[in-house]
Amino acid sequence: QVQLVESGGGLVQAGGSLRLSCAASGRTFSTCTMGWFRQAPGKEREFVAAISGGGVTTYSQASVKGRFTISRDNAKNTVYLQMNSLKPEDTAVYYCAARIGTFDYAYWGQGTQVTVSS
């Protein structure tokens, strides 16, 4: 199994940037697809981005519109989400998650709060 610990959330003004980090341990990190999700109060959890062990990326363009970038450093067992041009509607708890192959995401971090003020 995989243990995930997130960091990097905080309060930022609209138009600003944040970089979220998620450190993984407990299983072979390089074989896991890593994803970022977010959930605003009263709303469904939303997919943001994902990156495979081989570095293939997938984005929810409808949600992030090219403003976010996902990356990973397998040597550090860490996945990142660079968020630029933040908007108030980006305010949410952001979660990182891991899956093996095509299975559903089974491992989740505790979440980190991102608040974008106007």
Image (cartoon, rainbow, N blue to C red):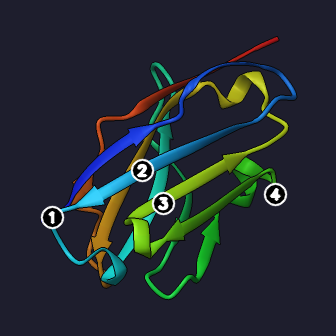
Q: Amino acid at mark 3?
A: Val
How far apart marks 2 and 4 lie (CA) works out to 21 Å
Q: Nearer the viewer, residue 60 or 109?
A: 109
Identify the residue at image location x=15%, y=64%: 26
Q: Quadrant of residue 97?
A: bottom left
Q: Position of residue 46 (x, y in %)?
A: 51, 45
Give whichever of discs 3 and 4 has the lower sequence position: 4
Which image quarter is the N terminus in?
Answer: bottom left
The residue singled out by tag 3 in the image is 79
Marks 3/4 in contact by CB < 8 Å: the verdict is no
Residue at position x 30%, y 58% in the image: 24
- Image side of residue 91 versus residue 61, left or right: left
Mark 2 sits on what residue?
22
Q: Are marks 3 and 1 in contact (CB under 8 Å)?
A: no
Q: Residue furthest top?
A: 118
Q: Earlier in the sequence, mark 4 or mark 1?
A: 1
Which residue in the protein does label 4 denote? 66
Secondary structure under badge 4? loop
| Element at label 3 | strand
Labels 3 & 2 near each other (Cβ < 8 A): yes
Q: Amino acid at mark 2?
A: Cys
Separation of residues labelled 3 and 4 (CA atoms): 18 Å
Q: Which mark identifies residue 26?
A: 1
Above or below, 23 relative to 38: below
Please report the residue visible at 79 percent of the width from the left and 28 percent of the height from the top.
Answer: 87
> Which class describes the residues within 10 Å of circle 3: few (<14), some (14-19), or many (20+)?
many
Measured in 3D between alpha carbons, the distance from the residue under mark 2 to the one under mark 1, in whole angstroms, is: 13 Å
Q: Disc 4 to disc 1, how far (Cα)? A: 32 Å
**Tag 4 near tag 1, CB within 8 Å:** no
Amino acid type at mark 1: Gly
Q: Is residue 7 above or below residue 69?
A: above
- Figure disc tally: 4
